[in-house]
Structure formats: C-alpha cells, structure tokens
Image (cartoon, rainbow, N blue to C red):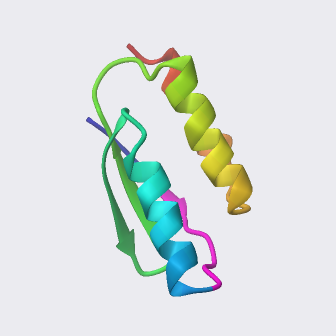
Amino acid sequence: MALLVVRGPIFHSAGDETAFFGWVRKIGAVQRVNSRGRDLEIHVRPGRVSADELRELRAAFHRYAMDTSDLEGLGREG
C-alpha cells in the first residue's frame, strides 16, 4: 500500500468536508484517507492505479485547490 501525505484543502462548511471525503473514499484505489492536522494521509491500494481512478483523484484535488504533483507517479507504479 502506498501512502500519500498531502496538504489538505480548506473546507468552507461541514457539508463541504463531508462531500470531499465521500468523493475520495469512493475511488477504488483509495483504501483509507485520514486527516492529520492540516495534512491528509491517503492510503492507496498496492499495484497500478487505473487511468479512471487517477482522473478522479486529480479532479478531487483540482476542485479543492490541492497540489496534484504528488499524484504523478501513481499511474506508473505496478
């Protein structure tokens, strides 16, 4: 399992936070996601992340103005 530690987004309401975590947890490659202060720990299942899963992660990161550079290597692992 890979572990990504990234700077988390700023949430504007409780519903906003719930929507973000719900979206990320629905992505098949994500086994678990936890908050650690201002950071997020995203546990990604072993093996190659599919193009669709990577696209969903990028979309969530982009929507919440997060840096996507840590996602670059995920699609190439395997």
Could you say which is closer to the camera, residue 6 or residue 60? 60
In the rendered view, would you say 40 is above or below 55? below
Residue 31 in the image: state x and y as whole percent: 27, 43
Corner quadrant of residue 21: bottom left
Tell me the residue at 29%/32% (across/down).
45
Residue 43 in the image: state x and y as whole percent: 32, 46
Corner quadrant of residue 28: top left
Residue 4 in the image: state x and y as whole percent: 43, 48
In the rendered view, would you say 56 is above or below 5? above
User: Which range is magenta?
Assistant: 5-12
Quadrant (top left, top right, bottom left, bottom right) of the C terminus: top left
Q: Image check: 16 left or right of 30?
A: right
Give the mark count.
0
Can residue 34 be seen in this snapshot? Answer: yes
Q: Image check: 1 left or right of 71?
A: left
Tell me the residue at 52%/79% (across/down).
15
Could you say which is closer to the camera, residue 67 or residue 23? 23
The rendered magenta stretch, by its main secondary structure, is classed as: loop
Q: Image check: 78 left or right of 68?
A: left
Quadrant (top left, top right, bottom left, bottom right) of the N terminus: top left
Residue farthest to the bottom?
13
In the rendered view, would you say 17 is above or below 22? below
Can residue 71 be seen in this snapshot? Answer: no
- The answer to whether residue 7 is magenta is yes
Tell me the residue at 37%/33% (across/down).
29
Could you say which is closer to the camera, residue 53 or residue 44? 53
- The answer to whether residue 46 is magenta is no
Residue 20 in the image: state x and y as whole percent: 52, 63
Tell me the residue at 38%/50% (across/down).
25
